[in-house]
């Protein structure tokens, strides 16, 4: 395969930073992006990465100008990795809603928006653009760090007891996650390039793929429950046709 050009969002740490190292090690080019790139991503320049200031939360006009700049660096983008984000622990009832704002692959390291990516894949696959949603379990990054994660103290008293359990879980999870982010990124790059553990499977790439034993178990359990629901309620579900 000819060398690919990747654009990766959220490269200051965690998965994003690991992507940069893994991509360059395979002989590909990478545009590493993030907020305040000249400061927070400067350490990636010496590795051979191009860096670009990108805040995915800004208005669309600014994003469009940044995209033009990105396309001009290497003359195009083959793979987009939508990795930028942060963890926010809040209760849905108290959460203020904020609407979410030409490559061969769009890789979504999922925090939300899975259905959107599935629709995108259906609309663009005939153009040779494939989208993949990666659903990682718990990986040892700074995602659960007290300085990274924002936990909303509930204002509704009914959530107080639940909140105690949530905070205990978050505190016990940070630093004990089973997943190795370096290995996860290597597997993702394998899939895109059809190498390593994904050799010979380029025509079999799924729209969704869990990462980690815990991620796989969550998907398996959800699938089993969904199949059980269809079985238990089949007569009622199927009774509504004309």
Image: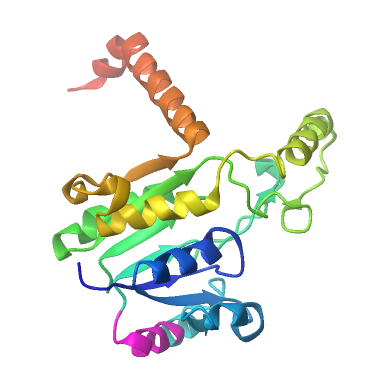
Q: Is residue 137 above or below residue 230?
A: below
> As displayed, is residue 226 above or below residue 36?
above
The residue nearer to you, when weighing 154 against 135, is 135
* Residue 86 rendering spot, x and y as whole percentages: 63, 58
| Relative to 137, residue 187 above or below | below
Q: Residue at x 39, y 19 (%)?
A: 224
**Looking at the figure, which quarter contains the C terminus?**
top left
**Residue at screen point 25% across, 15% down:** 239
- Image coordinates for residue 235, horizontal then vertical, percent: 28, 10
- The region drawn magenta spans 66-76
Is residue 119 visible to us here? no
Q: Residue at x 33, y 86 (%)?
A: 74
In the image, residue 77 lies in the stretch drawn in magenta: no
> Which residue lies most toward the left here?
126
Main SS of the magenta part reads helix
Q: Is residue 33 left or right of residue 208?
A: right
Q: Quadrant of residue 130?
A: bottom left
Give the side of residue 107 with respect to residue 43, left or right: left
Residue 97, quarter of picture: bottom right
Horizontal and vertical percent for residue 20? 47, 69
């Amino acid at each position: 395969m000819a060398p690919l050009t990747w654009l990766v969002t959220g490269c200051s740490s965690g998965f994003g930073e690991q992507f940069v190292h893994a991509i360059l090690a395979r002989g590909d080019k990478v545009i590493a992006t993030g907020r305040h790139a000249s400061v927070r991503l400067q350490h990636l320049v010496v590795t051979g990465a191009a860096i670009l200031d990108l805040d995915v939360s800004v208005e669309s006009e600014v994003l469009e100008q940044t995209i033009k700049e990105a396309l001009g660096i290497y003359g195009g983008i083959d793979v987009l990795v939508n990795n930028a984000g942060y963890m926010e622990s809040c209760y849905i009832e108290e959460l203020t809603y904020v609407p979410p704002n030409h490559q061969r692959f769009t890789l979504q390291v999922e925090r939300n928006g899975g259905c959107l990516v599935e629709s995108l894949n259906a609309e663009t696959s005939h153009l040779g653009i494939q989208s993949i949603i990666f659903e990682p379990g718990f990986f040892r990054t700074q995602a659960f760090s007290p300085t990274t994660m924002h936990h909303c103290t509930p204002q509704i008293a009914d959530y107080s007891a639940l909140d105690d359990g949530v905070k205990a879980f978050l505190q016990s999870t940070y630093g004990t996650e089973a997943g190795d982010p370096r290995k996860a990124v290597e597997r993702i790059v394998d899939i895109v390039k059809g190498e390593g553990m994904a050799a010979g499977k380029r025509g079999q790439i799924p729209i969704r793929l869990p990462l980690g034993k815990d991620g796989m178990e969550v998907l398996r359990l959800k699938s089993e429950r969904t199949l059980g629901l269809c079985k238990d309620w089949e007569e009622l579900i199927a009774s509504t046709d004309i």
